[in-house]
Image: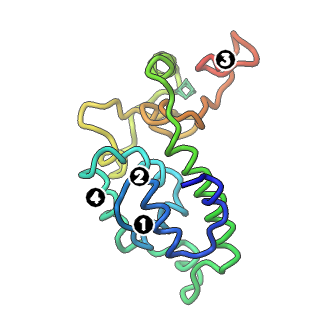
C-alpha cells in the first residue's frame, strides 16, 4: 500500500480496511474503533504501538467497541458530514501511516529516554485504563508533564519530538534534536 493512497480515502468502509492493514490485521477495524482513533490521537497511537501484540490490540479494540463519534454525541442524529470525514481521514490516516511505518533506532530511543528520565517534566502516569492496557507490565509508564505523552512510547516515534527547548543548548530540544 502506498502512503499516497491513504490521503485519497473517501469512504468509511475503505478507511476501515486500510486502517486494519496499517495495524497488521487481516480484517477491517470496526467503525467504532476507527472513529475513536479519529477523535483521540492517543488512542490511535496506542493501537499503532500494539501492532506486535494481538492481546493488547484486542483489548484496545474491545475498549472502544461501542464508541460513538464526538460529532454524533453532540448532534445526536448525524455523525461526521462527508466533508468532515474526508478531511479528517485524509489528515489522520496520512499521519498514522507515517507513524505506523516509522520508528527510531534503539540508540536514538535509548538517548531520548535517558533525557526524559533526568528531566523535571517527568511524572507518574495518571491512573487511566488506556495507559495500563497499552504498555507492557514492566515498561516505564511515566508521562511528560508538558505534552501528556507516555515517554516510553513517544520516544519510539520518528514523528514525535520533545516539546521543550534545552535552555543550555539553544536551538535544540531536551532530546538534543
Ligand atoms: S519529552 Fe522532553 S520535556 Fe518531556 S519529559 Fe522528555 S525530555 Fe522532558
Residue that mark 1 sits on:
33
- On the image, the x and y values in percent for residue 15 come to 53, 68
Tag 4–tag 1 contact (CB < 8 Å): no
Q: Secondary structure at mark 2?
A: helix
Camera-side residue: 75 or 154?
154
Tag 3–tag 4 contact (CB < 8 Å): no
How many other residues sit within 10 Å of disc 2, few (<14), some (14-19) or many (≥20)? many
Nearest to N terminus: mark 2 or mark 4: 2
Q: CA distance from mark 4 to mark 1?
A: 11 Å
Residue that mark 3 sits on:
166
The residue sitting at 60% across, 59% down in the picture is 6
Q: Is residue 164 above or below residue 57?
A: above
The answer to whether 19 appears left or right of 129 in the picture is right
The answer to whether 80 appears left or right of 116 in the picture is right
The single residue placed furthest to the bottom in the displayed view is 77
Camera-side residue: 2 or 96?
2
Camera-side residue: 101 or 85?
101
Q: Is residue 44 above or below residue 85?
A: above
Between circles 3 and 4, the one closer to the viewer is 4
Say if disc 4 is inside 8 Å of ligand 1.
no
Amino acid at each position: 500500500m502506498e502512503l499516497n493512497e491513504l490521503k485519497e480515502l473517501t469512504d468509511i468502509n475503505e478507511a476501515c480496511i486500510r486502517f486494519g492493514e496499517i495495524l497488521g490485521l487481516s480484517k477491517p477495524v470496526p467503525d467504532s474503533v476507527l472513529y475513536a482513533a479519529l477523535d483521540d490521537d492517543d488512542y490511535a497511537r496506542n493501537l499503532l504501538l500494539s501492532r506486535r501484540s494481538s492481546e493488547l490490540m484486542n483489548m484496545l479494540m474491545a475498549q472502544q467497541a461501542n464508541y460513538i463519534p464526538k460529532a454524533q454525541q453532540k448532534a445526536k442524529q448525524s455523525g461526521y458530514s462527508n466533508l468532515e470525514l474526508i478531511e479528517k481521514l485524509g489528515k489522520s490516516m496520512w499521519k498514522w501511516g507515517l507513524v505506523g511505518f516509522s520508528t527510531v533506532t534503539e540508540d536514538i530511543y535509548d538517548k531520548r529516554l535517558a533525557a526524559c528520565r533526568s528531566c523535571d517534566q517527568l511524572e507518574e502516569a495518571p491512573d487511566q485504563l488506556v495507559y495500563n492496557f497499552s504498555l507492557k507490565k514492566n515498561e516505564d509508564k511515566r508521562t511528560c508533564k508538558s505534552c501528556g505523552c507516555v515517554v516510553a512510547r513517544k520516544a519510539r516515534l520518528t514523528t514525535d519530538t520533545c516539546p521543550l527547548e534545552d535552555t543550555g543548548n539553544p536551538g535544540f530540544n531536551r532530546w538534543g534534536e
